[in-house]
């Protein structure tokens, strides 16, 4: 996630420079043709076209931002639920005999959020899970198609073990299971956002109409702008191409790009809070890299 106070023009241009160069070349061709050949471009209702396109792109960008914001809200719920699980494990099992089990629950939750982060970003989960769990403890979850869900199931079994051993009662077990349900619901929401793309109409037609508008733009402007048509048309095209690109950037909040929801930073926040809750040394928070928080 870019955290600079103002958008960086360099970042925007770097994402749209290819169609922008093609647009500039087309603008030059139209301008030269207008002055060399005895040809007069027809009058085009560019204001009408541009207004309709702006509305279309606005709806698309709003839909993309709603997906991005939903991803952020779900991860906020994950942070809160992780803290609640750790607090319940610490307060419900204060005895020394449950120390190892309590620590296991906390470490499994840290491994879980990191595994979920990797799954959403389509990265390998093994290394992240094994940073917190032994090979024997992690193996059952790593053998499953959904490693994060396997880790969560294992945590539920350990809570059940604590109840059978008499370290917590059934009411406390129910409360901790309710937190696991909240975690599972948040994961399901994230997987829905990740695996359900915008409808094809929201992806295809805005792209088609934007490029068509950019093609018609110099034809409609050349009579009034003259030799300044390449500059004016390219600047106007940049605006529409940039708005189109914003929707592409936000539509997948877990794409592991600079526009991503900062999953690495949020997983580190969970790791710090949970380790400190059991008295372990915690790492430093993730710091922005060149204005980007991953």
Image (tube, rainbow, N blue to C red):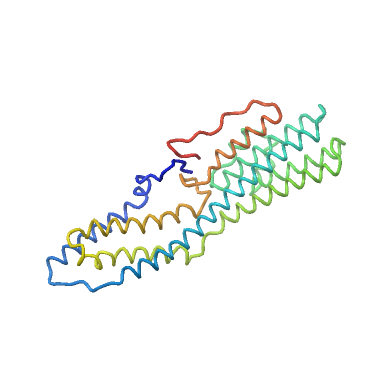
At horizontal 29% and vertical 65% (from top left) the residue drawn is 215
Task: Tell me: 37 left or right of 277.
Answer: left
What residue is at 44 percent from the left and 38 percent from the top? 291
Q: Nearer the viewer, residue 65 or 47?
A: 47
Residue 287 higher or lower than 147, as above or below: above
From the top left corner, tell me how far across and down residue 132 is, in percent: 64, 33
- Given residues 82 and 233, the one toward you in this image is 233
x then y, percent, for residue 247: 45, 56
At x 24% / y 65%, what residue is drawn? Answer: 221
Q: For the view shown, which residue lies furthest in the bottom direction?
A: 42
Residue 29 higher or lower than 267, as above or below: below
Left or right relative to 101: residue 124: left
241, above or below 173, in the image: below
The total of numbered circles placed on residues is 0
Out of 227 and 293, give the one closest to the viewer: 227
Residue in the foreground of this view, choosing between 184 and 266: 266
Left or right of 271? Residue 168 is: right
Residue 182: image x %, image y %?
Answer: 70, 49
x, y percent for residue 59 = 47, 63
Work out whether 288 lies above or below 24: above
The answer to which image quadrant residue 193 occupies is bottom right
| Residue 41 falls in image quadrant | bottom left
Is residue 53 rendered to the left or right of residue 283? left
């Amino acid at each position: 996630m870019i955290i600079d106070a103002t958008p960086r023009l360099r970042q925007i241009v770097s994402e749209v420079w290819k169609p922008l160069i093609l647009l500039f070349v087309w603008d030059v061709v139209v301008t030269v043709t207008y002055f060399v050949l005895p040809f007069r471009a027809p009058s085009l209702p560019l204001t009408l076209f541009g207004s309709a396109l702006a509305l279309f792109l606005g709806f698309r960008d709003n839909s993309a931002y709603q997906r991005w914001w939903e991803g952020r809200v779900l991860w906020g719920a994950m942070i809160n639920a992780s803290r609640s699980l750790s607090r319940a494990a610490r307060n419900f099992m204060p005895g020394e005999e449950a120390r190892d089990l309590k620590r296991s629950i906390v470490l499994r939750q840290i491994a879980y959020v990191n595994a979920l982060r990797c799954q959403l970003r389509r990265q390998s989960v093994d290394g992240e899970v094994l940073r917190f769990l032994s090979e024997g403890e992690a193996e059952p979850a790593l053998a499953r198609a959904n490693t994060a869900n396997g880790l969560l199931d294992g945590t539920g079994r350990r809570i059940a073990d604590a109840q059978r051993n008499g370290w917590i009662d059934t009411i406390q077990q129910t409360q901790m299971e309710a937190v696991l349900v909240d975690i599972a619901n948040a994961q399901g929401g994230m997987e829905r956002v990740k695996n359900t793309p915008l409808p094809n109409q929201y992806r295809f037609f805005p792209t088609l109409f934007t490029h068509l508008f950019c093609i018609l733009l110099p034809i409609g402007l050349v009579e009034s702008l003259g030799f300044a048509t390449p500059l004016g048309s390219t600047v106007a095209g940049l605006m529409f191409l940039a708005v189109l690109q914003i929707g592409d950037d936000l539509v997948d909040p877990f794409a592991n790009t600079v526009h991503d929801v900062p999953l690495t930073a949020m997983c580190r926040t969970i790791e710090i809070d949970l380790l400190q809750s059991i008295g372990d040394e915690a790492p430093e928070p993730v710091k922005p890299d060149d204005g980007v928080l991953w």
